[in-house]
Image: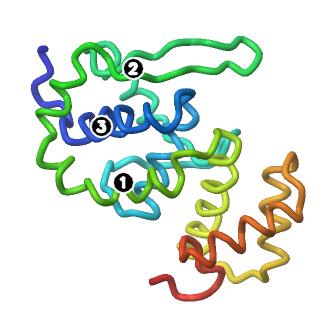
Amino acid sequence: MGMEGYPWERYGLIVELTVRMQAISPRFGKTAIQKMIYLLQAVYNVDYGYEYSFYTYGPYSFDLSRDLKIIEHHGGLDIYFVNSETNGYIIKPGPDNHLFREKAADAIHRAENKLDAAINEFGAYNTRELELRSTIIYVDRESQFNKIQQSRDNFITLIHNLKPHFEISYISSVVNEMEEKGFICLNKACK
């Protein structure tokens, strides 16, 4: 394949996630993979090594976007453009996906339970739902990192300002859900 020096563990974990998501989400695309890998890193501590910043649809990694193209080029993934209205894509395992997964077998084995937990928790959500949940977790993590204290109401207002297409009452219910599950801390020490 001519890919000496490539981050095989990272690439193999991406391909493995894509393989596992096929049974859960047949519309698994570029936005969904961005959110799932962010959640795997932020919530489940799977070390993909990506830096995320806030972008249009929530947490986004430019390096992950680049890596998806590399993996596709080398046959690990197939990425299809499917919808001109939403700029939607579908990502499927490529013809050489097994090579990526074989090279990353140890990393996949170490992350197995975390991959399963993340997919069980977040895998069935559509892209819009992943966008909201990953945004809530991202804002909470950034607030923790920057030692920003804010009330629950201010936090919900901030999320609404970032994601005005979601109603405040719905954001509030998802914030409660994320807090109950221990995915966000809201001014408390995270476990």
Q: Residue at x 67, y 19 (%)?
A: 87
State left or right for residue 129 relative to residue 20.
Answer: right
How far is disc 2 from disc 3 in space, using C-alphas? 16 Å
Q: Which residue is mark 2?
A: 69
Query: Mark 1 belongs to which amino acid?
Result: Asp
Instruction: Identify the residue position indicated by label 3 in the image.
Output: 16
Residue 29's x, y, as percent? Answer: 54, 28
Identify the residue shown where x is 77% and y is 72%.
Answer: 155
Q: Is residue 84 left or right of residue 18?
A: right
Where's residue 174, x and y in %?
A: 72, 65
Q: Of label 3 and label 1, which has the lower sequence position?
A: 3
Say whether residue 77 is left or right of residue 79: left
Q: Position of residue 178 (x, y in %)?
A: 63, 69
Marks 1 and 2, the one that precedes in the sequence = 2
Would residue 133 be found to the left or right of residue 4 on screen?
A: right
Q: Nearer the observer, disc 1 or disc 2?
A: 1
Q: Hey, which residue is sitting farthest front in the picture?
A: 23
Residue matched to label 1:
116
- Give the CA separation, mark 3 to mark 1: 11 Å
Q: Is residue 51 above or below residue 157?
A: above
